[in-house]
Image (tube, helix red, strand yellow):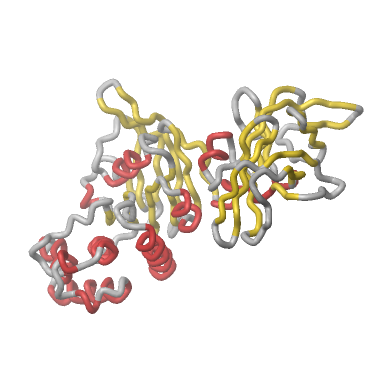
Amino acid sequence: MGSVSVRDVAVGFGDVNIFQNLSMEIEKGEFIVLLGPSGCGKSTLLNAIAGLLDIKDGQVWIDDRNVTWNEPKDRGIGMVFQSYSLYPRMSVEMNLSFGLRIAKVPKDEIAKRVAKASKLLQLDPLLQRKPAELSGGQRQRVAIGRALVRNVDVFLFDEPLSNLDAKLRNELRVEIKKLHQEIGNTMIYVTHDQVEALTLADRIAVMKGGVIQQFDSPHEIYHHPANLFVAGFIGSPAMNTIEGSIVQRDGVWRFEALGISVDVTRYPFANGPKAGSATLGVRPEHIGVGDAPRERHAAMGKVTIVEPMGGEAVLWTSLAGKPATIKVAGDSEVKVGDNLRFHFDMARASLFEGQTGQRL
């Protein structure tokens, strides 16, 4: 199913380094997502694994083979690009089989592989159509099928859904998830869309400036972000952050900011509580509205915007002098101008060191 090992890899162009000493270990059968903003190095890393870019230093291993200097065709990978790159004069069936025919794979083997990929991707009714007769989602399924017929252990996806509209993206995201569950091969997927990352991945590598900020499960990255960048990048709306400080008063450790004082005695500090500047992070769904339970701290805020979103609504307000968002039920009767009491679910909150932004 294909394990991938990236060991101290460096990639650059001239004097510009994209990343240095980057390492990651990917287990057989994992679905890994490389996530980050434009220019963070995620596509560059994927291309380095694929052999489409020469690396300055380090090694790439696939299935216990050092493939650092192997040609892409010799690495045992299948790649799906952002653009479909289908041959316009060929039918779907010919597009799927073209690479195999060039490689002089026996005809009966070609037919077997094309039939298998076509069934998996529900392309049987489309095999005799030309690309111009297909929708965007159908074309992308053909592009995926062209990689599948190669019978490789590792599949690389470079933002394959970014050219599709929202509805098609949702549909194909489900298809890719099903595909991985059925074939079980290792998949490495590049995207800047956090929804794709959270729904598809076994593990997510969040990247910034050529550095992996956190490499963990979607649950850990969402609920226990390693730093302020990850906290702000993952989640929609983003995590609320309140700048303040950690102090000890009357033997109790507290986080304090403008109009806010929170008992953090039970917070799972990695190295114990320590006085100093800090940032409190709370997801919008972890802020309650109304009277607070005794163990939760309450704060007052005026609702400035209400965003109805069907099953839920997003309230915009201000906490500690900074804009904040709170998620409530869609049938909530809260209106713009209401002054409400908010309280934090500290069991699900995060604290970050004030200077470095790293999780405490």
Q: In the image, is 33 to the left or to the right of 351?
A: left
- Quadrant assignment, res 104: bottom left
Name the outermost residue toward the top.
Answer: 15
Q: In the image, is 292 to the left or to the right of 348?
A: right
- State how many labels appear: 0
Name the outermost residue toward the left.
Answer: 89
Name the outermost residue toward the bottom.
Answer: 125
| Residue 113 percent coordinates (x, y) | 23, 72
| Residue 334 percent coordinates (x, y) | 68, 52
Could one spot residue 360 in this view of the protein?
no
- Residue at position x 59%, y 49% in the image: 306
| Residue 309 percent coordinates (x, y) | 54, 57
Could one spot residue 146 in this view of the protein?
yes
Q: For the N terminus, which image quadrant?
A: bottom left
- Vertical placement of residue 176 versus 217, above or below: below
| Residue 250 percent coordinates (x, y) | 91, 27
- Residue at position x 69%, y 35% in the image: 319
Report the front residue among 217 and 194. Answer: 194
- Residue at position x 39%, y 29% in the image: 20
Q: For the C terminus, which image quadrant?
A: top right
- Residue at position x 73%, y 43% in the image: 339
Report the front residue among 93 and 99. Answer: 93
Q: In the image, is 324 to the left or to the right of 201?
A: right
- Vertical placement of residue 357 versus 316, above or below: above
